[in-house]
Image: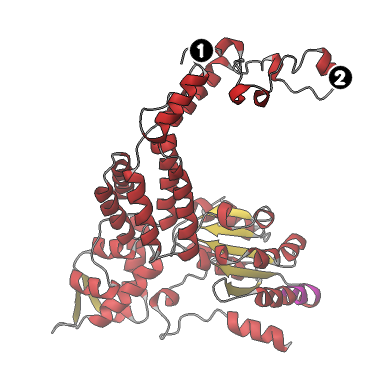
Amino acid sequence: MELFDTINTKTSNKQNSKFSPLADRLRPKTLNDFVGQKHLVGSGKPIRQMIEKNDVVSMIFWGPPGVGKTTLALIIANSVKADFIQLSAVSSGVKDVRQAIEKGEYNLKHLNKRTIVFIDEIHRFNKAQQDSLLHSVEKGIIILIGATTENPSFEVITPLLSRCRVFVLEDLSKDDLLYLLSNAMNNDQELSRKKIELEDKNIILEFSGGDARALLNGLELAVKLCKDDEEHIYHITNEVLKEAFQRNYIKYDKGGEEHYNIISAFIKSIRGSDPDAAVYWLARMLKGGEDPKFIARRMIVLASEDIGNADPYALTLATSTFTAVNYIGMPEARLVLSQAATYLASCPKSNASYMAISEASGDVEKTGELGVPLHLRNAPTNLMKEMDYGKEYKYSHDYEGHFTHQQYMPDELKDKVYYKPADIGAESKIKERLKNWWKNKKR
C-alpha cells in the first residue's frame, strides 16, 4: 500500500487554501458552478449525461489553455466518486503510468471503485508512453481523461484515440470571463475584503488571452502590485496590468475577428511576394500568442496553392517547417517560421495546380462517375481479360522518351485540359516538357 499512498499524496486535490493561487481557490467543485462549455455540460449534453447516468468513458479534452480541462476532469471524478490520479506528460514517464494502472487494478478488485487517470498535456507523451495505456483503457481498468492543446488527430496514437471520446472545449466567451472576474472580486476569501477598481476590464481580458487561469492569477498579482489609496481602494491601472502580465497590449483575439484579419494579411503578403510584410504579420501573431503550429500548417497549404510547381521545393520546406516547430517549440520556433515565410514570399508564384484540381473537381460534380477507358482498366481475372480489360494498353517505358500518345481521360473529357503551367520558375520547364510530349494534342 505504500506505493498507492505515494500516488494519492502526489495527486491529491487540496483546494481553497489562502496560500493557493486565486485560480485554484476559485476552482469550481460541481458542474453547476462550472463556467463555459455549455455544449458539453449543459442540460442534455454528453458530459452532463455521463455524470447523471454514472457511466463515464475514457475521453480526450482538446482546447486552448485555461478553458477548464483540468477542472472538468476533477468535477467528473468527484461527481461519480472515482479515485482521481493526476499525471503531467511533462514530468511523468511509463513508470508513473504503470503505478497509476496498478492503483486502478487495486481499486477495482478490492474497493469496487473506479479510477480516473487524468493526463495533462497528453500530446507530449511519446508512442511508448501512450501504448502503455492501451490495455488498461480497453479493459476498463482505468478511465483515461487526457487534456491537450494540440489536435489529437496529429498528437495521439490512433489505437488510443479510437478508445476515447474526443470533446472539443471552446474559448471562453467575453461574458464568461467577465463573470469570472466579478466572481473573483466579490466572492474570493481574500479579494472580496478589498475594494478593487479596474481602469479597463477589456485590457485585462486581452492580456489573459482568453485563459481563465491567466486572468485570475494576473488579477491577483495586479492587486498585490497596487497600493490602496486613502479610501482603501485599489485602483488597478493599465500600467499595473502590464506589469502583472509582463506584456504590452496587443490587439489579437485568437478566436475573434482580428485573428482572421492578421492571418489573412500574412497569407496575402506571402502570395504577393512581400517578405517584409510577411515577417511583420508573423511577428504580430507570435506576439499575440498564436499557436506556431497553426501558422506552419497555413504555410503548407500556401506552398501548394500559391507556389505549386513554380518551386516544388516550397512544399518540402513548408512541411519541414512544421516538423521543426513541433520539435523545438517556442521561442526558437519563430526563427524557423521566419525562414519559411521569407523563402515562400520570395518564391515564384503559380496557382496552376490549385486551378487544375478545382476545375477537375467541378467536372466530377457535373459529369458523375465516367467510365475508365478499357485499355486502362485492371485485368486480374481471365474473364476481365476476355472483356478486353487492359487490352492495347501501351507501357510507357517501352517507348522512346518513356512516353506514348494514348488516351488517359474518359471519352467524354478526352480533350479537357486542367493543368496549365505558368511561364515562371520551374513550372516554365514543365510547360515546355508537356508541350513537347503532347505536340500532337492541343494543350
Residue occupying the far front of the picture: 400
Which of 83 and 305 lies nearest the eye of the viewer? Answer: 305
Which residue corresponds to the image point at 26% horizontal and 79% vertical from the top-left? Answer: 223
Q: Amino acid at mark 2?
A: Asn
Compared with residue 350, is residue 270 higher up or lower down, i.e. above or below?
A: below
Residue 306 in the magenta stretch? The answer is no
Above/below status of 166 relative to 221: above
Q: Is residue 43 left or right of residue 165?
A: left
In front of the other: 409 or 121? 409
Relative to 265, 65 lies left or right: right
Looking at the image, is mark 2 or mark 1 nearer the viewer? Answer: 1
Residue under the image location 59 percent in, 17 percent down: 409
Q: Which residues are magenta?
A: 104-109
Which residue is denoted by mark 1 in the rendering? 441
In this rendering, position of residue 227 left or right of residue 307:
left
Q: Secondary structure at mark 1?
A: loop
Examine the image and state in which quarter residue 332 appears: bottom left
Image coordinates of residue 307 in percent, x first then y, are 39, 38
- What is the x, y in percent for residue 74? 56, 70
Q: In the image, what residue type sits under mark 1?
A: Lys
Work out whether mark 2 precedes mark 1 in sequence or the reverse, and give the earlier one: 2
**Nearer to me, 261 or 194:** 261
Which of the numbered marks, if any, corresponds to residue 328? none
Q: Which residue is mark 2?
A: 382
View extreme (bottom): residue: 2
Q: Where's residue 11, x and y in %?
A: 59, 79
Tag 2 near tag 1, CB within 8 Å? no
Q: Quadrant of the N terminus?
A: bottom right
Magenta residues, dominant SS class: helix
